Image (tube, rainbow, N blue to C red):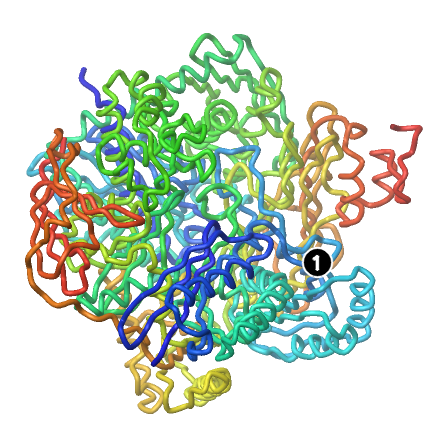
Amino acid sequence: METLDGITLNIWWSRLTSIVDEMAATIERTAFSSVVRESNDYCCALLDANGDLIAQNSKAIPAFIGTMSYTVREFLKVFASRTLKPGDVIITNNPWIASGHLPDLTMALPVFSGKKHIGFCGLTFHMPDVGGRSGVAADTTDHFQEGLKIPIVKLYSKGQIEKAVVDIIKANVRIPMEVMGDIEAAVTAAKTGESRLCDFMQEYSLSDLKMISRSVQKVSERAMREAISKIPAGVYSQSLTFDGWDTPLNIEVSIKVDGDEMVVDYSGTSPQVDYGINSVYNYTYAFTIYAIKCAVCPFVPNNEGSCRPIKVIVPEGSVLNPRYPAPVSARFLSGHFVHAAVLGALAKVIPDKVNAESSAPFWGMMVQGRRGNGEIYVTTGLLANGGQGASALGDGISCLCIPSNVGNTLVESTETTTGLRVTEKEFLMDSGGPGQYRGGLAQRVTVESVSSYPTDIFLLTERLKNPARGYMGGKDGTCGAIFKNGEPIAFPKGQIRLNKGDTVTLILPGGGGYGKPELRERSKVQEDVLNGFVSPEQAKREYGYSSEGHQDSSKA
Amino acid sequence: MSYHLCFDVGGTFTDVVLFDDNTGKITVAKVPTDPDEPINGIRDGLQDAIDKANIPNRDVQEPVRGATTLLTNCLIERKGKKTALVTTKGFRDVIEMAREWRYNIYDLLLKMPEPLVPRYLRRGVAERMDKDGNIIEALDERDLSGIIEDLKKEKVEAIAICFLHSYCNPAHEQKAAELVKKLMPGVEVSISSEVVPEMREYTRCSTVVANAYLLPVAHAHFADLRRELEAMQLSSGLYLMHSGGGVVTSDVAERFPVKLVESGPAAGAMAGMFYGKLIGTPNLVTFDMGGTTAKIALITAEAAHLVNDFEVARIARFEKGSGLPLKIQVINMVEIGAGGGSIASVDELGLLKVGPISSGSKPGPACYDRGGTQPTVTDADLVLGYLNPDNFLQGNMRLRQDLAEKAIGDSLASKMNISVLEAAAGINTVVNETMANAARVHLAEEGKDYRQYSLFAFGGAGPVHAIEVARRVGIRKVICPLSAGVLSAIGLMATPIAMDFVRSHLINLSGIDWKALEALDADMVEEAVSLFSSSGINRKQIKFRRTADMRYRGQGYEINVPIPEAILTNRDANELKQAFFKRYEELYKRYLKAEMPIELVNWRLNAEGKGSLLKIRPRGANGQCGDAALKGHRPVYFPSCRRSFQTPVYDHYSLVPDLKIDGPAIVEQRESTTVVGPGDRICTDSYLNLLVEVAEQQKLG
């Protein structure tokens, strides 16, 4: 079959990428959801008529890799290609079909060339509210507490909005105006994509997207296969333990590299649990592909072609592939560990391409309360990150979000949008795992309720008992901890209520170190002590360095 | 008798232009920039221009105007002085935590930019304001005195102060600054409420730290420069271009050096604005393509688009988020990592890519014959016949076509199994499409329609690529000015004295407090009046424009809305609301429900003094092209036609007004070349600018 040459393909492809970036700019600027505009929790894509991905916006977070195509193919099962009409918009937030929890809405707008359906403009984004206990809560005990589920339905038919669908959504969320505002922002973004795609096709006299889609898949698949075949064949495995809800959970992963293909198998991973921290297959799959891409071939774009050489097997009924209707609201509290597990397995064969374990997942406090005038607000309140794991090339970065990429919430924003005051937010000395390259530092954050109304907080935390591990002789980062009014909190993934004057302190986990600490350059230890990243005591104990500037010969 | 002097300190050269108001004559001087002693280049250049014009120094009685990359380079190369930061206790790491996200999600081993102040020089002091500016905890002056004594021992030369919520109550920052000045006389101090009184602690802190870091350098540099000017009998003062496209006196520049980081690029865009007015084309896309990057900005209704966010000193090429964020007013420009020196290669996917890696000035493109072996955009332009090997950089450098062909052949043509000419055409097409994409997205993000814009091209490679870029975007008119090589200096002359002011004032439109708004507006007006008075401009001569940053409540991104003039007299919140809807609809093609609450976040005031000083004179029209202008013919390849044409080559300086030339044609200038395709048509205007009518895009394959 005919494909495009390297010049034309680059020109067309970068044009399509600029179209999705334009869709992204539109939703980012008009969204009410703070995780969309400040934390990149959305994804824009162009797909062909079969639902195969052609281009994805460059900033999309890993959670959406590979999920959009799957969702759109499910759309096509309900609404066949030949029945679609210009002006249709299809949506769903079913976690098992879309991207793992109810707040994420996936939308597709079919694009036409004349009367022929030729592709889709797709978006997935995090809505500001979806009803239920909270936008994201770890302590849900069944899926139906998690909010409104929208099956695959048309939001628009031939340009006419489906009023019943809108009314049902509005009746089920706390802040209907903001939720509908974001859905409309997504429709606007999709329409922007549609009109630009039509311009492009007209300019180049194209009547469909088949040739470009085929070319994109082909070169991506070839590049991925080339990259995999550079890794020595073999089976590489890793076990990882994390806190879970009440008992620790295990991820067991084995990666079989065979020629230019890989099989990632999670057999032996802990069974699904009764709380909202299960990660559906789509989410597990996305983070698996992401970790492999980062370590093996970061430059290859995401699409069917680049995913084809990698098979991901996850036992059904496990915490990484729960059966419907398991609770899944805070799916990232298990799903984000996939990254560390996969990199840990790959560390056995390409150790210089990976990081030691990072503090991930990120920590969050979902906040619900009332403004001074009694009006209800719901926000992601406060997001914060611990330290990144170190690598063969350098120290881990302090307070960095990985594998996701959500930014922190600024102190002044938190204080103007919630009834909370932040009283400290500083690096945590000695939290980075010692090593030739030190793990990134964590932070300590304290908030105080200053509202006369009670404020409800849903805590999303991990690694209070299981630290981010060091690699190649590097030591572990410190564990996290969480306190209310100075007392440890019994359920670090539960709901707490704050009255005026109550405080919560989050001590985040540090990143793991890389390489033996005694190999660390003395000047770097000295700098760390000077800057208070490492205490003189830890410098002495772990690095054999005394603060007078002379190294302790007994440890050198 | 009136003469004006302007200088533009670039990374490689310092350009100087002397304008003679009586005759309209322009005298140009170009000298190498001495990065360690930039004053040398300025002095030599100024004197060179004066000597060439053959006038006595004292005849230049207007203030000297300048643009400089000195401050930007100081941030990029970290050449500033030892700087400390004092914050609210518990928040000294805000500057290093930044946003806690990664600018490249696929790079596990990525690096982040080092903060300008290392942690051991960052101190927290006990004090606290709440979100409304009420004092919750008084500033602990004993605590602060101890910190200052400590920083004295560290021999810091500058101190930045950034407290939480200082944008709504600066009292603690001001008090702290006083104490610093008292206990550490001679140290430079900068407070965030003065540099950027806006909400969001991270960007505010990053900006005030950069300002403090630059203060010692700026003070020394501008003081030296003034002394040098005095010694040269150029004593009428010194004005500098700031990033927002206005000039300020050097004492303002010394207080807010951070506002000058985009000084040079702003001057270029302001030149575009000047030409737009001159030839009656109010809407322009300015396109400045140089050796390593290209810059695109928009001018609408004779005004440059401004934004209040900038990022400087990116550590990863062109990756947004890899630099230091600055909350300063800048002309909204997109920077594209592709210029004449950008290297073309076949990537891992087998695609032909151009940039962002550049061959720089050393070794430079292969055709420079300085040891470069990788093919660049300039090599492709030479192979296609666009450049004259004997006319590059005023003939000071001979280009070697054989080396260009070899580089393209070895690294591209053989790998892709195509001819050298096809590969060169590929490079040209890819780079033009990259520029066109950037222009399309920029227009779309600003909610503008390309059909209402003309493209204004400058920079060494700008006119070479402009017409093809315009064709791809759908723009039908391209302007290539006669003085493409000295445009920044023209921009400097054309720019009025201007400053911007801002106050954060978060309030719901339904509960707007007009008295408070009027008070903070009056405060800004007074600040403007006092700053302008040093330039001899009085209150009546200042033109004020107001804008407000507004949003639907719950949105985190504000849009900047032009405010009706009489709003503070009319006190009609509905007028504000309508202005918001209008701008929102322009940007996003719709606005949300009228009943959604709208917030005002920042109130901005732009103050502008006298208009342009520049008078360019038209030439007499005659419409006859002398034989002198036609330099000859050469074969030129046009990728969209897929073939070569025997193409006439003209000397731009020998053209006459009202001339019509049908493409294909090449017009050569000292520093650039305009490439006009088959079907396009050149008209010269009375100033000898080339106005090119661009033929419609043929169907592309």
SS for callout 1 = loop
Residue B693, position as x, y percentages in the image: 11, 52
- At horizontal 25% and vertical 22% (from top left) the residue drawn is B420
For the residue marked with disc 1, what is the amino acid? Lys
Closer-to-camera residue (B575/A390):
A390
Residue A73, position as x, y percentages in the image: 26, 30
Is A107 displayed left or right of A238 in the figure? Answer: left
In which quadrant of the rendered image does the C terminus of chain A lie? top right
Closer-to-camera residue (B65/A178):
B65
Closer-to-camera residue (A368/A509):
A509
Q: Quadrant of residue A219?
A: top left
Q: Which residue is mark 1?
A: B82
Closer-to-camera residue (B239/A81):
B239
Residue A462, position as x, y percentages in the image: 63, 40
Mark 1 belongs to which subunit? Answer: B
Q: Would you say residue B667 is visible in this rendering?
A: yes
Q: Would you say residue A168 is visible in this rendering?
A: no
Residue B418, position as x, y percentages in the image: 24, 18
Query: In the figure, B199 relative to A237: above or below?
Result: below
